[in-house]
Image: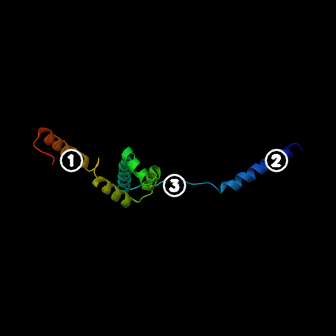
Amino acid sequence: MPLRPFLRSFCAVLIVSLLNLGMLQTASAAAIDTQTAVALEDRAAVTARIDERLAREDVRQAMQSLGVDPDQARERVAALTDAEVLQLDGKLAQLPAAGDGGWFILFIVMAVLIFLFASGKLNYR
């Protein structure tokens, strides 16, 4: 009779194992075509360029001054479709890299005016 508890335990383990046999997860893998692979690489490159621009300190400060959380902006970029990512990259590429140069022109004009006043060629009346 000592074999009976072992058989009960063995049967219980066997029943549980057989019940779980139908719950196996299967994974499928398929080859992708070249166009899909290139599109995925292009999206990754464009997204990396956008993330690089969003990571700049002046851009982060500008977003925060407008009330936009920079981390949330990066999450939204990741959720964009391929066409939207390309459109956003195109718009960002058109923007000036370091401002519009207005400060530099103002500096030149002020330097010329100061030089003209200092040399006496221009009088203030």
Mark 2 is on which residue type? Leu
Mark 2 neighbour density, 10 Å: few (under 14) some (14–19) many (20 or more): few
* First of labels 2, 3 by sequence position: 2
Secondary structure beneath label 1 = helix
**In the rendered image, which residue does mark 1 sit on?**
105
Mark 3 is on which residue type? Ser
* Residue 119: % across, % down: 12, 38
Quarter of the image with the N terminus is: top right
Q: Which mark is residue 96?
A: none
* Residue 106: % across, % down: 22, 47
Q: Nearer the viewer, residue 75 or 33?
A: 75
Decide if residue 56 is in sight here. Answer: no
Cα–Cα gap, marks 3 and 1: 62 Å
**In the rendered image, which residue does mark 3 sit on?**
28
Q: Is residue 14 left or right of residue 84?
A: right
Residue 3 vertical placement versus 31 (above, below): above
Cα–Cα gap, marks 2 and 3: 38 Å
Q: Which mark is residue 7?
A: 2
Kindly identify the residue that appears in the image at 34 percent across and 57 percent down: 86
Decide if residue 120 is in sight here. Answer: yes
Q: Residue furthest top?
A: 119
- Dots 2 and 3: beta carbons under 8 Å? no
Cα–Cα gap, marks 2 and 1: 93 Å
